[in-house]
Amino acid sequence: ESSPFWPEQKRRFKAMVFALSVDAKQWSDFCQDGDTAKFTAKSCDPKAAGSADLRGVPADAWFCGRTHNMDWSARGGKPVVDLCSAKPGTAYSEEGVCGSLGHKQLLLNVINEGPMQWDADPTKINIPSMDCLLDFLDCDIVYCQGCAGRCNP
């Protein structure tokens, strides 16, 4: 992305989300501080949105790309991204879940495949968007692999 437009839109989106969501800002702070234990504890809390039941599994089982007892037929039979097998610390590398997509694509994913569509098609939660833009997907990888029900029943 040679144009400064998309990185600037990403920065503005992130600032807007943090202004609207104390939770998102707290997750970001935990991740920026390298405190994956607090990040995971907050994410794994039974009252957290990712713990809510969505089609018989925790909502974040869809986000993480769990395959056991999951219907991925809307995505060709498998998750778009597999955070359950991803190596922690690789999300923003050139081949990583976030790094392989530009700011423009991630912003388009939020608009076209983002939260407004997740209830109707929970497989869309697995399409890289929000957490990549908020810069905490590396912590999400640790969370997915460390919280019961996210990657395994």
Image (cartoon, rainbow, N blue to C red):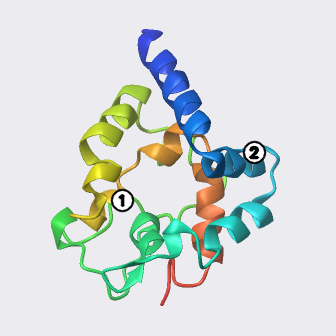
In the picture, residue 62 is in which quadrant?
bottom left
Q: Is residue 132 visible?
A: yes
The residue wearing badge 1 is 125
How many residues crowd around disc 1 within 10 Å: few (fewer than 14), some, or many (20 or more)? many
The answer to whether residue 84 is seen in the rendering is no
Q: Which residue is mark 2?
A: 29
> How far across and how far down the image is residue 5, in percent?
43, 11
Q: CA distance from mark 2 to mark 1?
A: 22 Å
Q: Name the amino acid type tagged 1.
A: Ile
Q: Is residue 68 above or below residue 142?
A: below
* Local SS, label 2: helix
Which mark is first along the chain, 1 or 2? 2
Question: At numbered mark 1, what does the secondary structure look like: helix, strand or loop?
Answer: helix
* Residue 8 picture location, percent across and down: 50, 16
* Residue 38 versus residue 102 in the image, above or below: below
Q: Residue at x 39, y 36 (%)?
A: 106
Three-letter amino acid code at the position of disc 2: Asp
Q: Nearer the viewer, residue 26 or 70?
A: 26
Which labelled disc corresponds to residue 17?
A: none
